[in-house]
Structure formats: C-alpha cells, structure tokens
Image (spheres, rainbow, N blue to C red):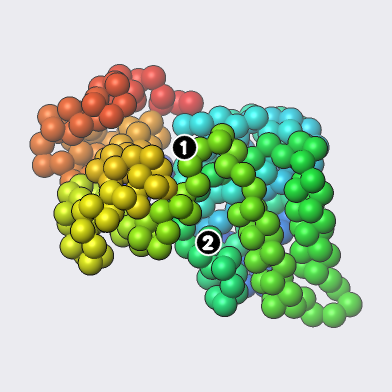
Amino acid sequence: MVPPDLDGGDPSRGSAIPRLDFNPPEERVPGFEIVDLATLHERRRRRGSRPDAVHRVDFHTLTLITEGSGEHAIDFVTHPCRPGTLMWIRPGQVQRFADPGTTDGTHLLFTPAFPPHFSSAERLVNEWYGPVCWQLGADPAYAVLSALLGQLRAEYDRTEQAVSAEILQLLLATVLLQIDRLPHPDGGTDPHSGGEVYARFRAELERSYATTRRAADYAHRLGYTVKTLTRACTAATGQPVKHVIDGRVALEARRLLAHTDEPVATIARRLGFPEPTNFGKFFTRHTGATPGAFRLAHQGR
C-alpha cells in the first residue's frame, strides 16, 4: 500500500494525486468488475472526470485493447495502444489516458483480495513490481487471453442464474498465470528471479520507503543480511539493493513533483528528507534534473 501520508490533502487544490476507490455503479460480485473500455470512459465523463486526468487506483486493472488506437501513460512512460495491447496497472501506480483516441477493449477491475488465496495468482497480485504493458500483436497469447476474458465476461453477464464468484476467481487466476508466462516486454530481467527474498523486500520497501533509505534497516526488519538483499535485488533487477531503494524514492518524488503543486520542501519531508537541500541533491543525482526543473518540464502533461 502507498503510505497514506503521501497521498493526503485536498485534491481540488492540487495537493494530492486523485485516488479512485473500487466503486462500480453495480457491484454484481464484490471486488470484481469487467466492462468495455469505452463504457469506462463514458462513466468517467458522466462523473465529471476528464478521460485524460491523472489518477491512481486502489485496485488492479487489466486492459486488453481489441480495436482502435490511442496512448496510455503509466508512471512517465507513454505506451501506444492498438489491438493486442495488454496493460496491467497495479494499486498506487499513477496513470492517465494520454490520448484515449478510438480505443476499445476489455477492461477488468479487481481488488487485491479477490483472486483465490490457494493459487499462485495470489503471489502475482501481491507483488508491487513487474511489467505493465505488452504488445502481443499476432502472438498466440493474444487469442488465449482474449478467449479467457470472453469467458469471464460471459460469466459476469449471466442473467438466467446467479453469477458464480468462484468461477470468476478461478478464471481470473488462469488469466494472471497466463500473463506471468509472457516474456518481459522489453527483454529486461525477470523480477521473479529474486525469489521470495526479493518479494518480501519489495513489500517492505512499499511500506517504508518514506521513512528509511538504509539497506541495513530493511535487512534487519526482514531477518536477512545486506549481502543477501543485494544478491536478490541484483538477480531481479540487475541493481544492488541501495539502487532499488533510491529508485523507489525517486519515483515517488517524480510523481509528486509532476502531479501536485506541493512545495518542494513539503515533498522532501514526506519522503524522509529533513532538509530540502539534501532532497535536491538526491533528486538531481538520480534523475539528472533539479526538482524545480523536473516540475517545470512535466507539470500539466
């Protein structure tokens, strides 16, 4: 979970990144919904939200584009959307439909608690990392996932008999496990190669990145040595543990600078820097730009 103090404040004043709760207009099955992407855009318009507004969600979304073209921005990376594009956005990630264009497809929403607890899919849902976009094109996986999502939709839309939450859970688990088989979209390192050590570390990092950047603190809390954490992080990301920690802090700093109007000093304190000067040096070292220059270049996008 994103630490709550990082996303507090009054959204109308631009002091927070708007956060959307799981709140479908008709919750046929608690914690799960599947709709057309075009229906989602229309729903947001009726609620007064611009389709291209920046926001976070407290749940998972899976989108398979089936027609049209457009663009979707996820944490400073803009992904082209066309038939065969698959996106998995996890809780806390910052996104916007940079250009909804003419895209349509299947949009699946589910809370972290919805997938069955006895399957490996639970591990995938609880991970705070991993690829967010695949361009499947003519890949056979596109047909497989399209068929599975069609089965999910057919079950969810049942009218003759009650919808089975268990069937939806099992089909969703199958979808997630199929996605886990896909190669890394940019040929990067497989995050699963860090094993349980890396998974536990990343969960602790999400809880604590705003309070400590010391690798030794994470090692102590998890019962490992710093060397063990470094080995797991290097296997999963190609980077040592300190780089992974600093990268997570820098990501949140970029989010807050680009998508809120909070003073730099306030953002610095939120991220555990008592002195704005130290935050500025940290940010410049990790991004190549000062906080002010980064904000100027990215706000309003």
Helix, strand or loop status at disc 1: loop
Tag 2: residue type? Val
User: Where is 288 relative to 13, above or below?
Assistant: above
Residue drawn at (68%, 33%) of the image: 81
Circle number at residue 125 = 2
Residue drawn at (75%, 48%) of the image: 141
Q: Nearer the viewer, mark 1 or mark 2?
A: 2
User: Where is 256 relative to 198, above or below?
Assistant: above
Residues at marks 1 and 2, CA–CA distance in whole angstroms: 19 Å
Image location (x, y in percent) of residue 183: 62, 44
State the image quarter where residue 201 is shown. bottom left
Apparent side of residue 124 relative to residue 172 in the rendered image (left or right): left
Q: Are marks 1 and 2 in contact (CB under 8 Å)?
A: no
Please name whichever residue, 150 or 258, is drawn nearer the observer in this view of the structure: 150
Tag 1: residue type? Asp
Residue at the disc numbered 1: 75
Q: Using the rendered image of the protein, determine whether residue 43 is visible from the camera's viewpoint.
A: no
Apparent side of residue 148 relative to residue 131 in the rendered image (left or right): right
Q: Residues within 10 Å of mark 2 (few under 14, many from 20)?
A: many
Mark 1 or mark 2, earlier in chain: 1
Image location (x, y in percent) of residue 241: 28, 46
Circle number at residue 54 = none
Image location (x, y in percent) of residue 190: 50, 47
Residue situated furthest bottom in the rendering = 161
Count the marks: 2
